[in-house]
């Protein structure tokens, strides 16, 4: 038996609208400050995952230092909206300034490295992800060193101040996610998006079709980085603080695991993967730990295993379901092309053996 | 000048460690074109394995006389065997199935494997640095104002000896020839009767065993380690492999020593906070201006 959804919900737009409506209602169902706080943080990570998805999912470039752009966006906001230098630009302007600065760094890093083969790019971004937080740590006279920058400005709308309650931040993040989904979705179908996918499938062939591969890849890097600037502003203004330890390699891998789990290249998949991992970190592991403690395993703390779990997710998904839980059809076909080749080869082998016999 | 000479010695011994790790990166990259991100963690495992073996042997401090040679030999060989097996298991579990998959897939599993190894080591030895017994006695060789420690001599000699053995193995034995053939063209090698699965596993065995040796040496050299040690060391060793020309054994060695020197000089003349930044800048510059490395040949794009 198949359940037939009402007509408006059978279109992607209808489904997106439904998801958005549910997302607006969620904090009122929970009626719980901790839950709203979780939703706001998880939302910022959805934004990050959507940004990384452009680079890894759409353009097929493995960026292992995505947290560096997140750091740059956050610090850009922190320096321009805090007592650190006494500069207090309005939040809504900084949202665009910070994502612009992150995008510029995306281009600065990308320009020399994007001509490289894909695997070199991975290690260069890994190194970049390592040195950016370290640089913020070392330049203590500007960045506050290990303490970071605190008492950041809160967003305001007219005379309304966002304050310390998570709810307005959640709605802001939700708005940013809607913007990001709209942008990513439109880009995917655009000439640029199709060029990204052509490069992902076969860079050499794409270049022969007249695609300027370096410029196209740079665009992916800049776009992905700009999303992380948005997330950086949202999260930094909510936490009122940026510090170098928020942007380690673990964060880059956390976001990558969201993509791999949900489905690289597929926007709904990426959102779901991101929410699953955020929930895992905030609820499932602590609850599981409590449960095990109740059973008498008092020395177990599952929260310490979260990075182990991300590692296992990356390996297991790549081995057994590389297209993710909610795959895009095209990506699935690409990732299973090798299997098909193997099937064809096995078939030919059988034919050959029979013919020889 | 004295400071410079002293840092030259320090840099060469640091470089010996990076060179041994870089060999593993370059061999694996040469044969299956994969950056084995887990390799740096195999190196850290080497230190922990060595520590476990030393504990089994009851060694907690300086050993002297003939016992020293025995202890060092048993520990190094033990660490090499255990790390080599770890490498083979990693290849079998995580990489073999993905040999024909798009490039992104094995790179992502490599990152995943690295995370898994790091966290297993976290369970095993905890989050804080673990001290390593100073096995080697320390009658320093003093030349004028420059002091060379015995352990520094050991690092440099061991790195060069292992490198020579490897060179002989790869260029003068049948298995080495099989490895070179597989690196050139897997299909053709298979048609010539080479078992490429065994050959690739052998490559991981040797590369990881060298990381195991490096692990022991670094334990003795630094006197401590911790579970994330392999992350930065792996990045530097990979830089060394690229600098020398990836896929090229002598290049990895040369690159290792150069990166060691770079790090020592940065620490002395700038600040050790910036040594990672400088090494990484070297990586980017090499990739931009000479992606084939110092000794490598540039390869055309394969279609």
Image (cartoon, rainbow, N blue to C red):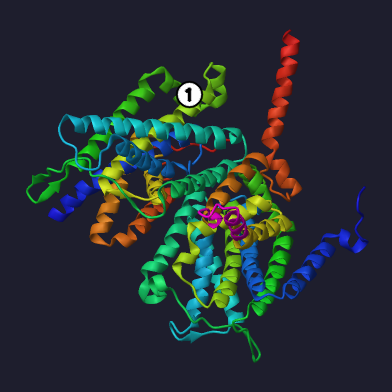
Q: Does residue B229 lie above or below A52 as drawn?
A: above
Q: Magenta span: helix, strand or loop, mainly? A: helix
Among the 4 quarters of the image, the one containing residue A316: top right
Across and down, in percent, residue B275 comes to 33, 57
Residue B49 is covered by the magenta coloring: no
Count neighbours of disc 1 (C-alpha within 10 A) and say few if under 14, some if 14 to 19, many if 20 or more. many
Across and down, in percent, residue B53 comes to 33, 36
Among the 4 quarters of the image, the one containing residue B165: top left
User: In the depicted view, which residue is nearer to us: B208 or A334?
Assistant: B208
Q: Give the left or right position of residue A19, taking residue A207 as reference.
A: right
Residues in magenta, as a range: A286-303
Q: Residue at x 47, y 43 (%)?
A: B38
Q: Does residue B187 lie above or below A280 as drawn?
A: above
Q: Residue at x 46, y 21 (%)?
A: B178
Work out whether residue A211 can be spotted. Answer: no
Q: The C terminus of chain B lies in which quarter of the figure? A: top right
Q: Give the left or right position of residue B140, taking residue A138 as reference.
A: left
Q: Does residue A129 lie above or below B152 as drawn?
A: below
Is disc 1 placed on a helix, strand or loop?
A: helix
Residue A301 is covered by the magenta coloring: yes
Among the 4 quarters of the image, the one containing residue A273: bottom right
Query: Which residue in the structure is indicated by mark 1?
Result: B181
Q: For the view shown, which residue lies furthest in the left direction?
A: B144
Work out whether residue B72 can be spotted. Answer: yes
């Amino acid at each position: 038996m198949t359940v037939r959804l009402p007509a408006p919900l059978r279109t992607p737009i209808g489904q997106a609208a439904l998801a958005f409506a549910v997302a607006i209602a969620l904090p009122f169902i929970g009626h719980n400050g901790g839950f709203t706080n979780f939703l706001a943080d998880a939302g910022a990570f959805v934004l990050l995952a959507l940004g990384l998805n452009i680079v890894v999912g759409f353009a097929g470039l493995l960026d292992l230092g995505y947290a560096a752009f997140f750091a740059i966006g956050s610090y850009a906001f922190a320096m321009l909206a805090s007592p650190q230098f006494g500069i207090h630009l309005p939040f809504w302007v900084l949202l665009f300034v910070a994502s612009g600065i992150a995008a510029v760094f995306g281009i600065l890093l990308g320009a020399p490295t994007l001509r490289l083969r894909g695997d070199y790019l991975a290690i260069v971004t890994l190194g970049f992800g390592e040195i950016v937080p370290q640089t913020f740590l070392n330049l203590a006279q500007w960045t506050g060193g290990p303490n970071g920058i605190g008492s950041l400005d809160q967003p305001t709308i007219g005379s309304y101040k966002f304050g310390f309650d998570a709810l307005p931040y959640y709605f802001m993040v939700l708005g940013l996610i809607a913007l990001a989904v709209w942008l990513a979705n439109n880009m995917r179908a655009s000439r640029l998006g199709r060029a990204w996918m052509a490069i992902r499938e076969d860079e050499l062939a794409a270049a022969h079709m007249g695609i300027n591969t370096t410029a196209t890849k740079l665009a992916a890097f800049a776009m992905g980085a700009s999303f992380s600037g948005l997330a950086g502003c949202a999260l930094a203004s909510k936490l009122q603080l940026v510090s170098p330890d928020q942007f380690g390699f673990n964060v880059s891998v956390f976001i990558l695991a969201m993509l791999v789990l949900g489905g690289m290249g597929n926007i709904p998949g990426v959102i779901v993967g991101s929410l699953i991992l955020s929930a895992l970190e905030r609820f499932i592991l602590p609850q599981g730990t409590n449960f095990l403690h109740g059973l008498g395993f008092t020395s177990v703390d599952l929260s310490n295993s979260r990075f182990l779990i991300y590692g296992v997710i990356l390996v297991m998904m790549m081995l057994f379901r590389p297209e993710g839980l909610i795959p895009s059809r095209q990506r699935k076909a690409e990732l299973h092309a090798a299997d098909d080749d193997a099937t064809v080869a096995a078939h030919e082998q059988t034919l050959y053996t029979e013919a020889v016999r | 000048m004295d400071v410079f000479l002293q840092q030259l010695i320090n840099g060469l011994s640091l470089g010996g460690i990076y060179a041994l790790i870089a060999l593993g990166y370059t061999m694996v990259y040469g044969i299956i074109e994969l950056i084995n991100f887990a390799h740096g963690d195999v190196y850290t495992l080497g230190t922990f394995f060595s520590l476990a073996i030393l504990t089994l042997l009851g060694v907690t401090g300086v050993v002297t006389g003939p016992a020293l040679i025995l202890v060092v030999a048993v520990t190094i060989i033990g660490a090499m065997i255990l790390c080599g097996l770890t490498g083979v298991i990693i290849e079998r579990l995580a990489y073999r199935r993905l040999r024909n998959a798009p490039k992104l897939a094995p790179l992502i599993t490599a990152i995943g494997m690295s995370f898994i190894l790091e966290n297993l080591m976290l369970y095993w030895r905890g989050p804080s640095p673990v001290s390593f017994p100073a096995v080697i006695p320390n009658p320093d060789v003093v030349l004028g104002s420059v002091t060379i420690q015995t352990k520094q001599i050991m690092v440099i000699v061991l790195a060069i000896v292992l490198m020579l053995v490897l060179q002989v193995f790869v260029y003068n034995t049948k298995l080495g020839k099989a490895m070179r053939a597989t690196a050139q063209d897997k299909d053709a090698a298979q048609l010539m009767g080479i078992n490429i699965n065994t050959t690739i596993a052998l490559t991981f065995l040797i590369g990881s065993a060298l990381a195991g040796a490096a692990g022991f040496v670094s334990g003795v050299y630094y006197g401590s380690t911790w579970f994330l040690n392999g992350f930065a060391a792996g990045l530097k060793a990979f830089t060394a492999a690229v600098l020398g020309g990836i896929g090229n054994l002598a290049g990895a060695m040369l690159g290792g020593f150069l990166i060691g020197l770079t790090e020592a000089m940065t620490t002395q003349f700038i600040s050790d906070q910036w040594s990672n930044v400088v090494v990484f800048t070297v990586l980017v510059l090499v990739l931009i201006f000479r992606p084939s490395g110092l000794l490598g040949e540039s390869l055309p794009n394969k279609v």
